[in-house]
Image (cartoon, rainbow, N blue to C red):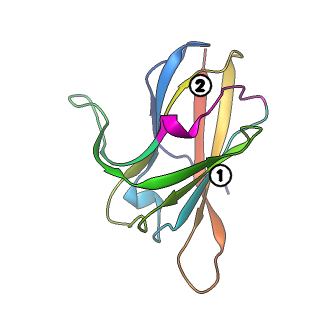
Amino acid sequence: NYKKLYYWQSSKERRDRATYYLVLRERDRKTAILKLKISFPKYFDATIKAKNLKLCKISLGGMLEKTKCIEKVPATFEVAKDYSHVEVFPEKVISVDDSYAVVMKIFNPSQAGMFQLNAMGQVPGDVPVSRYLGSWNVDVD
């Protein structure tokens, strides 16, 4: 089942420096998250580095305010060698009560198009099971 997630990106131009806010709102999640995995399509040819990623508690923007980080959440990031996915291991469980975002500072892909980034979340419990949280459909012109 496809579920659209909210995101914000600073630039949609090809090969331009951009900041992505991949948002997980409280209404998009039913349980807390122990681990998060974000997968990228093969043709998303951006170089992703762990030092340019962070996990934040955010305040969502709108007409009068920008989306911004309120508090940085300590987390470990593991980027696959082929840049096919990123795994986020927060030091404490991501609660259901607030909105969180993975903030990426990258250069946009050189190929224009629409890219579907999928989010999988591992819930705390006796049996570590990952489940689909939703997808961000990112546009690059």
Residue at image point 60% right, 46% down: 135
Q: Is residue 100 above or below residue 32?
A: above
Say which element carries label 1. Answer: loop
Q: Position of residue 38 (x, y in %)?
A: 62, 48
Placement of 94 over or under 136, stated as above or below: below
**Relative to 106, 40 lies left or right:** right
Is 81 drawn above or below residue 123 in the view shown? above
CA gap between label 2 and label 1 equals: 17 Å
**Residue at horizontal 56%, vertical 40%?**
50
In this image, 70 relative to 80: left or right?
left
Quarter of the picture holding the N terminus: bottom right
Q: Quadrant of residue 69?
A: top left
**Amino acid type, label 2:** Asp
The numbered mark, 2 or 1, whose residue comes first in the sequence reads: 1
Identify the residue at horizontal 55%, vertical 26% (top origin): 106
Residue at screen point 51% across, 37% down: 51
Question: Quick check: marks 2 and 1 in contact, CB under 8 Å?
Answer: no
Nearer to me, 62 or 86: 86
The residue where tag 2 is placed is 139
Amino acid at the residue labelled 1: Tyr
Query: Does residue 31 show up magenta in the picture?
Result: no
Residue labelled with disc 1: 2
**Magenta part of the protein: which range?**
43-53
